[in-house]
Amino acid sequence: MSYIGTGPLYGNYPSQLITPDGTDTSFTLNHAPANAASIIVSVDGVKQNAADGAYGVSGTTLDFGVGNAPASTTKIEIIYLGLQADSVVIDETLGTDAIIRTNGQTIAENITIPTTTNGVTAGPVTISASYVVTVNGNWSVV
């Protein structure tokens, strides 16, 4: 497929399924989106429009508003757009030719490495309980 400008940078869009109880209007999200436009919300496959007031987001709270509790027979799907792992790279120069890159040592979120991507981590590394690293491409721990 052709693109005008830069092609897509991220191909993995994490999703979350919520089964409402028929009374709650607010739900906890797995990730805090930047704003309501950073997620796609569908109720039983019907896309909801935040611009029309169908829902709002504050931090990790998805809110359908007073009196708008989704029925317990519905399924809510949240698709996070452009979500990427937070990382900090610090470069320090030692001498004239050496560069040290540092990285964190604990993985505290689910991470997927797409088939067209290589990942490198300097060990040791710990994956916190209940989190998963899915490697479809390549991941080297050195």
Image (cartoon, rainbow, N blue to C red):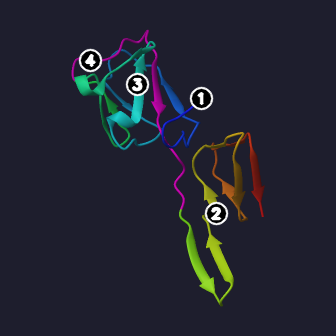
Q: Secondary structure at mark 1?
A: loop
Quadrant containing the C terminus is bottom right
Question: x and y percent of residue 49 in the render?
Answer: 31, 22
Q: Main secondary structure of the magenta part?
A: loop
Q: Disc 3 vs disc 2: Cβ atoms closer than 8 Å?
A: no
Counting residues from the start of the chain, the first of labels 3 and 1 encountered is: 1
Question: x and y percent of residue 9 in the render?
Answer: 55, 43
Q: Secondary structure at mark 4?
A: loop
Q: Secondary structure at mark 2?
A: loop
Q: Which residue is mark 2?
A: 105
In the displayed structure, 50 sits above or below 38; it is above
Tag of residue 41: 3
Q: Which residue is mark 4?
A: 68
Q: Nearer the viewer, residue 4 or 17?
A: 4
> Dot 3, crowdedness within 10 Å: few (<14), some or many (≥20)?
many
Which is closer to the viewer, label 1 or label 4? 1
> Dot 4, crowdedness within 10 Å: few (<14), some or many (≥20)?
some
Q: Which residues, given as a range, are shown in magenta?
A: 66-87
In the displayed structure, 96 sits above or below 86; it is below
